[in-house]
């Protein structure tokens, strides 16, 4: 039977973060022509600051999202403990991003170029953090499946010889999505908006994957980190609108598509909760998630169009 193993999680994540910071150092040396010593020092700085600020950001975001609940159980207990279920993943992402920005300032490096150099390493950290959730059972899992699936599609838990459960391994899909973003970031390493676009494609699949997770940070029917990811994605599309010419209607098509997808996603979440019925019957979950996936593909297409138009103007 799979068990919660915080030690194994921290070891696997720590090794992955160390490797990612070494990768970042090599990227700095190659892309910004830094000396080996200076690039290694910057990588070590991100390793230290990223660990501290990443943890702080993860706890701070969760504290903000669950403020009233935490006040009831005790603020002191919350801040003095390390419970992985009380951490915000994208709060951690924000903290690590801040650590890279501060490192650029400390070493007098151009912030935008330094963030671009970190993009692939950051996606690698995100992927490793998701894969490591294997050790945090039942973190990162979805609903119990009627028909068992093999790992890595699902996690099968055996409670005895005669009883077992198969749960969708959402954390694996999240890890694979971040790993794909890492590969794309490496392939497009000369992209001037490399960090922005890498983070875009880390956040984009989370809009559906956060809906599949059973351990999300929820406020009523709202999946908070799903909303955070959508707001970032929509923010990028709005930014394209301004940069491509705010007086041109065509510049705002990506942002308008984003708003349409937002409305559909809200309706789809109500369908999943059984609040919207089809001919008096619940809408099949597979159909709902399929439509949601089509919406995300549309967002990827309009992001590509917006980036292409901005590149053409540049």
Image (spheres, rainbow, N blue to C red):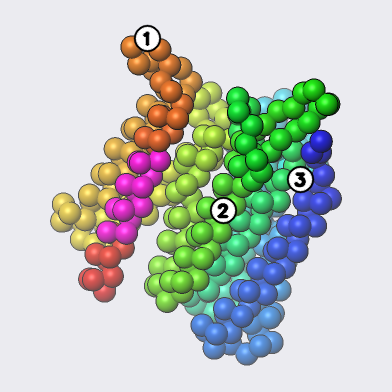
Magenta-drawn stretch contains 304: yes
Residue stretch in magenta: 293-305
Q: Quadrant of residue 125?
A: bottom right
Residue most toward the top? Answer: 280
Q: Up-down: is 185 above or below 8?
A: below
The image shows residue 216 at horizontal and vertical percentages of 60, 34
91 and 16: which one is in front?
16
Query: Which disc, if any, is residue 209?
Result: none
Q: Would you name the residue on which mark 1 appears?
A: 280
Q: Up-down: is 246 above or below 191?
A: above
Chain-order first, disc 3 or disc 1: 3
Q: Quadrant of residue 231?
A: top left
Q: Can residue 213 be seen at all in this image of the molecule?
A: yes
Q: Secondary structure at mark 3?
A: helix
Mark 1 surroundings within 10 Å by alpha-carbon count, few (fewer than 14), some (14 through 19), many (20 or more): few
Q: Residue at coordinates 65% horizontally, 85% vertically from top-left?
A: 38
Quarter of the image where the N terminus is located: top right
Q: Residue at coordinates 69% horizontally, 87% vertically from top-left?
A: 37
Chain-order first, disc 2 or disc 1: 2
Q: Would you name the residue on which mark 3 appears?
A: 135
Q: Secondary structure at mark 2?
A: helix
Q: Would you name the residue on which mark 2 appears?
A: 176
| Marks 2 and 1 in Cβ contact (< 8 Å) | no
Mark 2 surroundings within 10 Å by alpha-carbon count, few (fewer than 14), some (14 through 19), many (20 or more): some
Residue 57 as seen in the image, left or right of residue 302 = right
Magenta-drawn stretch contains 133: no
Distance from disc 3 to disc 1, alpha carbons, whole Å, reads: 41 Å
């Amino acid at each position: 039977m799979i068990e919660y193993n915080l030690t194994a999680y921290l070891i696997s994540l720590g090794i992955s973060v160390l490797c990612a910071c070494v990768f970042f150092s090599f990227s700095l040396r190659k892309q910004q022509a830094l000396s080996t010593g200076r690039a290694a020092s910057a990588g070590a700085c991100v390793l230290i600051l990223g660990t501290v600020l990443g943890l702080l950001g993860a706890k701070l975001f969760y504290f903000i999202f669950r403020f009233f609940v935490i006040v009831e159980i005790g603020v002191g207990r919350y801040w003095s403990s390390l419970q992985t279920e009380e951490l915000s993943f994208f709060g951690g992402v924000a903290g690590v991003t801040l650590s890279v920005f501060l490192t650029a300032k400390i070493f007098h490096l151009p912030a935008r170029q330094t963030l671009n150099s970190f993009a692939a390493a950051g996606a690698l950290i995100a992927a490793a953090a998701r894969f490591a959730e294997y050790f945090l059972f039942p973190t990162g899992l979805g609903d119990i499946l009627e028909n068992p699936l093999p790992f890595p599609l699902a996690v099968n838990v055996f409670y005895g010889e005669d009883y077992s459960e198969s749960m969708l391994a959402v954390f694996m899909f999240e890890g694979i999505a971040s790993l794909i973003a890492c590969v794309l970031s490496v392939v497009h390493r000369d992209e001037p908006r490399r960090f922005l676009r890498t983070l875009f494609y880390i956040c984009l699949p989370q809009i559906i994957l956060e809906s599949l997770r059973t351990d999300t940070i929820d406020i009523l029917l709202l999946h908070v980190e799903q909303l955070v990811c959508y707001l970032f994605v929509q923010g990028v599309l709005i930014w394209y609108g301004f940069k491509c010419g705010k007086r041109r209607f065509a510049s705002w098509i990506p942002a308008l598509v984003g708003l349409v997808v937002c409305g559909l996603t809200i309706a789809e979440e109500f369908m999943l909760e059984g609040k919207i019925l089809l001919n008096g019957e619940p809408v099949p979950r597979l159909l709902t998630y399929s439509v949601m996936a089509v919406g995300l593909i549309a967002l990827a297409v309009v992001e590509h169009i917006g980036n292409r138009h901005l590149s053409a103007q540049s």
